[in-house]
Amino acid sequence: MPEHARAELDSPVAMPGDPDEPRPPGQLAPEEEARIERLLEGLNEPQREAVAHGEGPLLILAGAGSGKTRVLTHRIAFLLYTDQAQAGEILAITFTNKAAKEMRERVERLLGWGTRGMWLMTFHAACARILRAEAERLGYTRQFTIYDQADARRLTKRSADAAGVDPKRYTPAAIHNQISAAKNRLIDASSYRQAVGSQFEEMIADVYDVYERDLHRMNAMDFDDLLFRTVNLLELFEEVRERYTNTFRHVLVDEYQDTNHAQYRLLQLLVGGGRPPARGEARPGDRPTYAGPVGHRNLAVVGDDAQSIYSFRQADIRNILDFQDDFPDARVVKLEQNYRSTQTILSAANAVIANNRGAIAKRLWSELGQGEPIHVRELDDEHGEARFVVGEIERLLDEDPTHPSRAEIAVLYRTNAMSRVIEDTLVRREIAYQVIGGTKFYERAEIKDAIAYLSLLANPFDVVSFTRVANSPRRGLGQTSLSRIVAHSANVDISVWEAASAPEQIPGLGAAAVKALRRFMDTMDDLRARVEQRVPVGDLIEAMLSQTGYVEALEAERTIEAEGRLENLEQLVEVGREFDVARVGGPDNEDTLEVFLQQIALVADADTRSEDEGLVTLMTLHNAKGLEYPIVFIAGCEDGVFPHSRALDEGSLEEERRLFYVGVTRAKRELYLTRARRRAVFGAQTYGLPSRFLDEIPSELTDREEEPLLSTGAIPAGVGVGAGTRSARWRAPEGWAASRASEAPAGRVFRMGEDVVHTAFGEGVVTGLEPGGVIVVRFAGDGSERKLMAEYAPVSRR
């Protein structure tokens, strides 16, 4: 046992057989010494140091694959073995119920007895338990209801209606997203109102007031309240805070880099620590630190700043970056030995993440050998990329006896929409696959809605499709109205389309429903006319999504989830355009929409007939966190795709780089990074530059062949470089950048440090020059850095 750990033990352990004879502090019985040594066996030196740490704050910087869960569970056992804490004095917090269950099982295996008295649970479960005991202090009963996401959104809709908010302009999802973000920043309704700066925020404040009153009146809390109200409780009632501080002598937190501000504040209240700002030092917007009585400060956190990828869920990376500011005497232990990946993969990850300015320095290393070089491949387009990925999967399965199972292979991508081409290729090659953390492309709700619209246009008798889309997006046609429409069509023996086209003849249908139904059918009649004119399927889908208000409704949500659904719909438009190209020269007497729907149905049916085991795994990079696979493909390594264009626009490049780091470190033996020279975006061919992350990997770690990025004249006139904004793609498929590209003068030369002006992004300075006529420009307006094709971008000297 390390000497520093032995010296810090503050509770002597009685000698077996002689309980009355005192023993010097820190001295353990021989059998207890042996038990602790067995616990520490197999741990490397930094792991042993973290496990055996005594009193005071501890920051465990656990690199990917470094055994953080093992350290956390062994530390819990060590605290119990050495009598530094009893079972009920340990609070160990994780982020998911699955992780909490795994932690409990592993601790029980180490101890050899149950963990019933310990608080090994998620943040929300711990807060719910505290609030059940103390709810009456906050004006609730102990039987308060906890509303899940669906319940909370239903209440948000009621509150918005009561506040007179137009549901077509502001959806319940958009409003609740803003309220949730405020609660996670510990901003109550009155504080939110004081800080409003726009009409949208004024509207949110109105709904927030009503929403909070309704929740309290109903004796209910939403999930965000579990954290928010627990913080309120500990701040308002000092005796309660002291009781829980004394109860939990040791607090341990997993995945600390993913904590938000409410979770940060909760921990500070429970353990003390943090430094209040000096008089006159605090400024509006400063992150408050705990300024009350100093607690025991026995907080051990495990995390990795390089894997902080959830800012869209309100996670605050500053919590881990500033830990040593909050606890200046904290012991910092770095776990840098990786037990998962080859050194080549780790060296690539180290090289990429080193470009983040705010990162805590650490270097992963492995004893597993150098391994295979990283396979970097450039393909012509997204279909060539998919064929390469699936072809390599087939080769690995057929030719290499060391890779016998499809379950060892994962394909990762930045957004859900990117899975579509890969899924289609896997289906054609009859390779079973599964989508983790998401839904297969043709099973996604927005895709099923769009296909239902098309099915109704093709078949006016399709009652199922009619009832699915008539009120999606919401038009004021409730279930009762829809049932009356369907019943009327059956009673008079006409199609549901014909019934809906004469709403005034439907018995019992209210005036508002008649008006809404008439508007809906006017839109459908216009779309039906397009079908009869045999417009291309891609154009039909685009028009349908726009004219029905489906896109507008998703844009109004202003959520990350809605952004993803819009990207999926863009992919469906691209499916239609691919179908149109393939049908050129086909029979004139075929109903193209029916043929298209038939093909979609066959692909979707093949998706549902996959095997249960041994599947190739597809998922987004966010969903891959915490997982590992022998072979990993990361597709779409292009600027604007990964890193995502939204991140480039919003200045969150460092988080995108951390996401790339997460993806790279999922691979154990082999890693493939692929990119497409051009990618179809809403019907237009968009030429993408290689992801800057590829350039950050030392060439000696890869097997790529050096090629010019894009030769002069490789971009046809009228084709854009990089993805435009979504609104531009929906409203002007050719894209503003596309029309400007052909007008740019050829043969221009820029110099490092030269001031330039871009017609869209404003003033900037040239910070880099790359092969193939690529310039790197940092723009003053938002601080973003972009790669541009000098010959085609609308950029000029200032």
Image: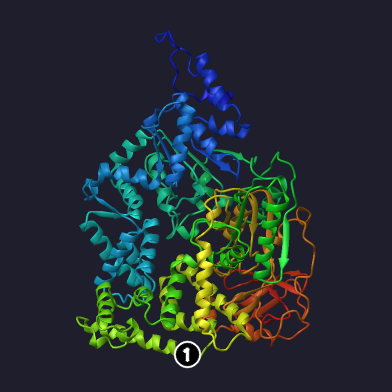
Please state the total of marks drawn on the protein image. Answer: 1
Asked whether, in this view, residue 578 is left or right of residue 559, the answer is: right
Q: Is residue 423 above or below residue 491?
A: above
Residue 297 can be seen, yes or no: no
In the image, residue 385 lies at what x, y percent? Answer: 67, 66
Q: Examine the rendering and report whether any part of residue 406 can be seen.
A: yes
Residue 39 at x, y = what percent? 54, 26
Foreground pick, 541 / 131: 541
Residue 639 rendering spot, x and y as whole percentages: 64, 68
Q: Which residue is mark 1?
A: 532
Q: Quadrant of the N terminus?
A: top right
Q: Residue at x 43, y 67 (%)?
A: 445
Q: Is residue 788 above or below residue 220?
A: below
- Identify the element where label 1 is drawn: helix
Q: Residue 213, how many percent across, how many down?
A: 24, 61
| Residue type for callout 1 | Glu
> Residue 708 falls in which quadrant of the image?
bottom right
Quarter of the image for residue 490 reads: bottom left
Left or right side of 377 for 469: left
Is 180 on the left-hand or right-hand side of 138?
A: right
Identify the residue at horizontal 54%, vertical 48% (top origin). 626
